[in-house]
Each structure stands twice: as structure tokens, then as C-alpha cells.
Amino acid sequence: MSEISLTVNGKRVSGTAEDRTLLVHFLRENLGLTGTHVGCDTSQCGACVIHVDGKAVKSCTMLAVQASGSSVVTIEGLADGADLHPMQAAFKEHHGLQCGFCTPGMIMTATDMVNRHPEGLDEATVRAELEGNICRCTGYHNIVKAILAASETMSSKGKARQAA
Amino acid sequence: MYSFNYHRAASVADAAKLLESGDAKLLSGGMTLIPAMKTRLAAPSDLVDLSHIEELKGIEVAGSTITIRAATTHHDVASDEKLKKACPALAHMASRIGDPAVRYKGTIGGSIANNDPAADYPAALLALDATIVTNKREIAADAFFTGLFETALEDGEIVTAVTFTAPAKAAYEKFRNPASRYAIVGVFVANGADGVRVAVTGAGDSGVFRSKEIEAALATNFDAAALNGVKVPANDLMSDIHASADYRANLIVVMAKRAVAAANA
């Protein structure tokens, strides 16, 4: 057993868990943050993607104890109160989901993707970068559309901030 | 996953000491070890986490000598500006390992210590004639990769860095399994001061190997056309549901041609 303390969506949290507890289970079961999903449990589908210290990782392939001391952002931490994050808004606007199971992982991967490509995104890049996220409904077309749209919104907001 | 005790090492010396407890294993990015533990293919009593050791991270480029510390992630290798100039082939190879989330966690040291027969880094280090530095000694890549998931590493030995001389030209091409994305065949070609070296991953019955047929054909003429008609024997190649040994033998020459063309481009 280990004492695990980390920052999740801006709040300091701590708990005790077995060393073998996966980060995704710690988030879901100890902290009740069930937005992060367990899909394949074999690091292929990406439904469990969250940000650890600013990097999109698969929380089914990381131990909770490895993340102790880190800062974690989950899907629950993206919106600003009632205002959706631009990526969430774009998924809603462009119908970037069907059953919705893969959506939290898709959105966390997509926000990281936009951050890593300040020069902007094109369709080929988005499709290549979605390598580690699987949508069993095969709704990729609208997911790609949503990410491209959000990438525009996020970069124009960034530019507006810089200008201001 | 079976129960184990987790330890976070503060230094390489600390990790070496912790490694003495029970049936301990080193944990770097965990992109292979954690899945193996989940399926109970691996069941260490203790895990020694290397990922918080600062002395194990970073890339140095001094002239043509490149040193990559062992806990450097694939993402950092792929995006390092100095490395992209000095040895673009290796940075590009790292950018195509797994997926973006895996590249943020997986490390060069973890990959070569595991020596998966379909991993990309073993081919790169063998072709680049790299030296693997451990906490005890230096090992030439030719002597390091000894078989399927087997290396020259001894108990208690920790990979700390890899170092090599940037070749004038190099490239890596792989034919990926459409489901797993692992290489069915991957070929790294390097044309450096000491000649042409060609290493093949994904195909060998005993893991990564150098193709003397392709090296011989390229030695005097580093051009894709020099490989026309070259045959690689299928005797020691893998056959599985994805590809027969004969298919892989042919694919090795095809990937080598593409790699040479990319290196010359």
C-alpha cells in the first residue's frame, strides 16, 4: 500500500491504494471521477487518456503510485464552469460522437494534439495523431472535423490573447 | 496484476541498490512492462521506478557524437531540434513508435533493455554502431542484442545512455502490422565513416540482425538500384500468421530500397 497524493483538476487529493492500482482505477473508484473510461485495458483504444503533467497518457497503463506528486487533468477538468472547453464545444457542434464511450479520451488526446501543433493542423495530421484512439462506432469523420474546427478556435483565441 | 512493492529511485546508485531486493524489475515508461504484468506474463516482487532520475534524461549533441540518456522518451527523441539536425533518421524513427500517448512514456533505455524482436530502436542502434552505456560498463550494440527479449545485460545492470557517431546518411523504413502497428519488417540503413550498416527488426528468428547481403551490395554503391536482384535468405526468419519467412525475406529488400532512397533524398 502507498499513500498517493496528487493534484487532480486543480485540487489537491490524496488516498491510499495498493501499489498495483492503475491510475484509471484510482481516478474512477477512489476519486469518483468516472468520466475517464476503461475501454480495452491494453493501451490500444485510448478511452482512458488523461493529461499527466501536461502530457496525454493512457491511464490504464500507468500506476497510480507513479503519478503521485503529479498534476492530472481529466475530462471533468476541461470545462470552465458551465462554459465548455473549445474542444468539447466543437465535438458537440460537429457531432463528433455517436455512443460517446471514446469521447473523453478523444477530447483529451485532441487538446494535447492542438497544443503540440501550434502551427495548425490538417486532416492528414489529425488522422495520423489519432493512431492511439479507437472509435468502435467508426465515427472518425466528424471527430476529425471537430478537432480541425477546435484547432482554429483555440489558435485564434491564443492569438487574441497575445494581441491583448 | 499480481501484487508488488513500488520503489521510486532517486539516483542510478539508489536504483541499483533497490534492484537487489527480491525479484525486482526496473520500471521506465512501463509501456511494455505494465501490460505484461496485467496479463501476468511478468510478476516481479518489486518495481524500481527510474522515471524520476534527472541524470537519466536528456540528449547531447557534441559535433557528430550523440548521447541519449536512457530515460529519454520517444517523444523527446522525436522532437529534439539538435538531434533532428544531427541524425534526422533516428528522430523520425522515434516519431513513428506506437502512438502519441505511448511516445510520451516509452523510453529508449526501456526499449533496448526489453529487446522486443519487433521493436524499432534495436535496429537503429545496431545500424548506427552505437555503444550502450550501463552503470557498470560499455557494450557495443553488436554484442548487446543477443536474442528474443535477450540482451547482454547482467543482473543488477542498468542502461544509463546510448552513444553513437552521426552517420552522413541514414533512414529507417518499416512495414507495419495493420493491427498492432509493430514492424513486420523494419530496416535501418546507415552510411557512416566506417561503411554501410544495415539492421533488420521484426523478421529475425533470434531478433534484430545485420543483413550482410544488403550491406555488401550497398558497400560500393549506396543506391537503391544496387539492391536490384539481391536476395536475403529466409532460413532464419520468422513465420507467423502475419507473414511467412519468404514474404519477410522479400520485404526486407523492399524496405531496404525505400530506406536507401529516403537516406539519399
Image (cartoon, grey):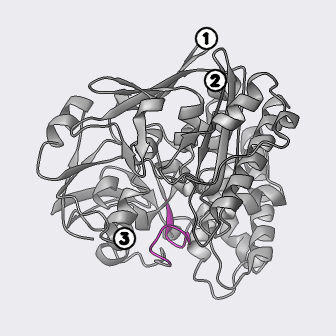
Q: Position of residue B228 (x, y in %)?
A: 85, 41
Observer-side mark, 3 or 2, equals 2
Q: Chain of mark 2?
A: B
Furthest residue toward bottom: A99
Q: Is residue B63 left or right of residue A118?
A: left
- What residue is rendered at 46% in x and 77% in y? A38
Q: Which residues are magenta?
A: A40-50
Mark 3: give few (<14), some (14-19) or many (20+) Cα within 10 Å: many
Is there a contact, CB below 8 Å, between mark 1 and mark 3?
A: no
Is there a contact, CB below 8 Å, between mark 3 and mark 2?
A: no
Work out whether residue B115 or residue B244 is closer to the camera in this orientation and state it: B244
Q: Quadrant of residue B133?
A: top left
Q: Amino acid at mark 1?
A: Gly
Q: Amino acid at mark 3?
A: Leu
Observer-side mark, 1 or 2, equals 1
Q: Looking at the magenta stretch, what is its main secondary structure? A: loop
Q: Which residue is mark 2?
A: B82
Q: Which residue is mark 1?
A: B63
Work out whether residue B60 or residue A36 is closer to the camera in this orientation and state it: B60
Whole-angstrom CA distance, mark 3 to mark 2, is 38 Å
Quadrant location of the C terminus of chain A? top right
Q: Is residue B86 above or below residue A99?
A: above
